[in-house]
Amino acid sequence: MPRLHGSNARSPVWNHYEKLEEKEDGSWIVKCVHSGRVILSIHTKLGLPP
């Protein structure tokens, strides 16, 4: 899967994650490229633009 960078990510921290899935609500499931941990990014629920 692609790493998050460019127009998809507004912070350099996202260069360390791979996007696994985008949910219907705009949240992402991502995986850390270093540790392999999978997390859910809920940026849209905080009122921030996708």
Image: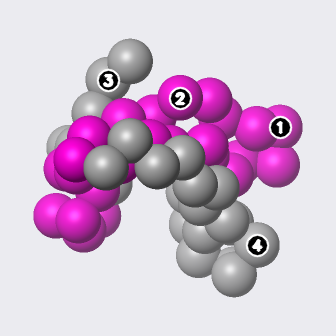
Q: CA distance from mark 1 to mark 4?
A: 12 Å
Amino acid, disc 2: Leu
Label at residue 24? 1
Residue 4 visible at all: no
Mark before the other along the chain sequence, 1 or 4: 1
Q: Is residue 10 left or right of residue 50?
A: left
Residue corresponding to mark 3: 2
Circle nearer the viewer, 3 or 4 = 3
Could you tell me if the residues under marks 1 and 2 are in contact, i.e. CB atoms within 8 Å? Answer: no
Could you tell me if the residues under marks 1 and 4 are in contact, i.e. CB atoms within 8 Å? Answer: no
Could you tell me if the residues under marks 1 and 3 are in contact, i.e. CB atoms within 8 Å? Answer: no
What residue is rendered at 32% in x and 23% in y? 2
Residue corresponding to mark 2: 20
Label at residue 5? none
13 magenta-colored? yes
Residue 10's spot in the image, x, y percent? 29, 64
Q: Which residues are magenta?
A: 10-34
Residue 12 visible at all: yes
Q: CA distance from mark 2 to mark 4?
A: 19 Å
SS category of the residue bearing label 2: strand
Mark before the other along the chain sequence, 2 or 3: 3
SS category of the residue bearing label 4: helix
What residue is rendered at 61% in x and 43% in y? 29
Asked if 3 appears above or below 2 in the picture, the reply is: below
Mark before the other along the chain sequence, 2 or 4: 2
Number of residue marks: 4
Residue corresponding to mark 4: 45
Amino acid, disc 4: Lys
Mark before the other along the chain sequence, 1 or 3: 3
Q: CA distance from mark 3 to mark 4?
A: 23 Å
